[in-house]
Image: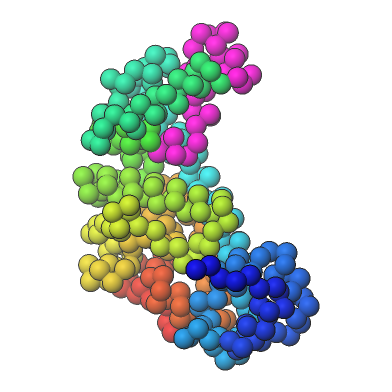
Amino acid sequence: MSKKYQDIDQKIQILKQRNLLFTDEEDAKYRINEFGYYEIISDNSDPFMIDEKYIEGTRFFDIYALFCFGGEIRDHIQKSSIFFEKLLRQAVLKAWCEEYGNHQSKYLDKKNFRFPRKGPQPLNNLVSKFAKVSFADDDPILNKARVENNNVAPWILVKFLDFGNIISWYELLKPELKTKVMKHLLDDKTFNNLNSKSGKDLFTHMLKLIKKFRNRSAHGGQVYTYMPTLPSGKPFIKYNQYFHSKFGITKEKYDEGYGQTGIWTILALLKLIKHPEPYLILSHLLNGGFKEYLQKVDTMRHYINTKTFYIDTEIQNEQTHLNI
């Protein structure tokens, strides 16, 4: 049964009955009308509530400030993932061209890819996308390549692929080329420790988890407590001795939830990348502004620590909790 629609005054009264304080009701109404009740209140109230009542002293401004901060986090995830995508794009392109050269016939030939274990559809979809760019997309850059060279080279093709296409291309590379991509992106110590089946699985799921967060951020979803899982319900990131011990996460802590998924796991994964920019962009907010915010708001600090499995990526010892 759907909930009955309530106007803004009714909603304010219900919030008051749940102990939320308002210092300027008209300003609160304006902000709720402008940005949406669900986006401000429903998405951000949990850290401030116990038994469906707001913790004593909680103000509308506290929730609105978290709503605004959530927008900043989404912006930083977008910037970080875009930078990461550029690195992945070039790593895949480099590995491909070293092996197959610059002619479109190579990336249109399914024999040059790994056949997917789950059937031909992923490969068919990818090559169909490549063919559409090569033959059908009406773009001045593509038209020029067709007229002058009768060939849309891989470094032109790659400009017309989205993040999901690039991840699919990586997944469908033959094993030796996937290894080259990892070597190009990971720092040497990390690559040496992850150049195994479990390490390659970690890298693949890292790509998919970053994409999950990027998509959610692009659509305005709340991300600071977003904890996605695989379609099977299993964690995105399996336990990996090298990766998890790097951030003080034992197998016992992993089984509790640390390092399985979530924004702090994303941040830790980005620290494995050779190029620091994607990590620094997100860390600037999470290990800077957000940490400062958490120190000021006790209820939020406790919530993040106990509900989202905070990982302090600035340290490499057994401390995985905020001090609360």
Seen from the viewer's position, the closer of residues 233 and 186 is 233
Q: In which quarter of the image is the C terminus?
A: bottom left
Instruction: Specify whether residue 104 is painted magenta.
Output: no
Q: Taking 16 as reference, is 91 left or right?
A: left
Magenta span: predominant SS is: helix
Inspect this view and state whether residue 84 appears. Answer: yes
Residue at the far bottom in the pictured view: 56
* One can see residue 40 in this view: no
Left or right, 318 with reference to 297: left
- Closest to the observer: 72 or 220? 220
Residue sitting at the far right: 26
Q: Position of residue 245 (x, y in %)?
A: 27, 64
Name above or below for residue 289 compared with residue 138.
below
Residue segment shown in magenta = 138-167
Residue at 50% across / 78% down in the picture?
A: 47
- The residue closer to the viewer here, 34 or 197, is 34
Q: Which residue is drawn at 44% across and 51% down?
A: 212
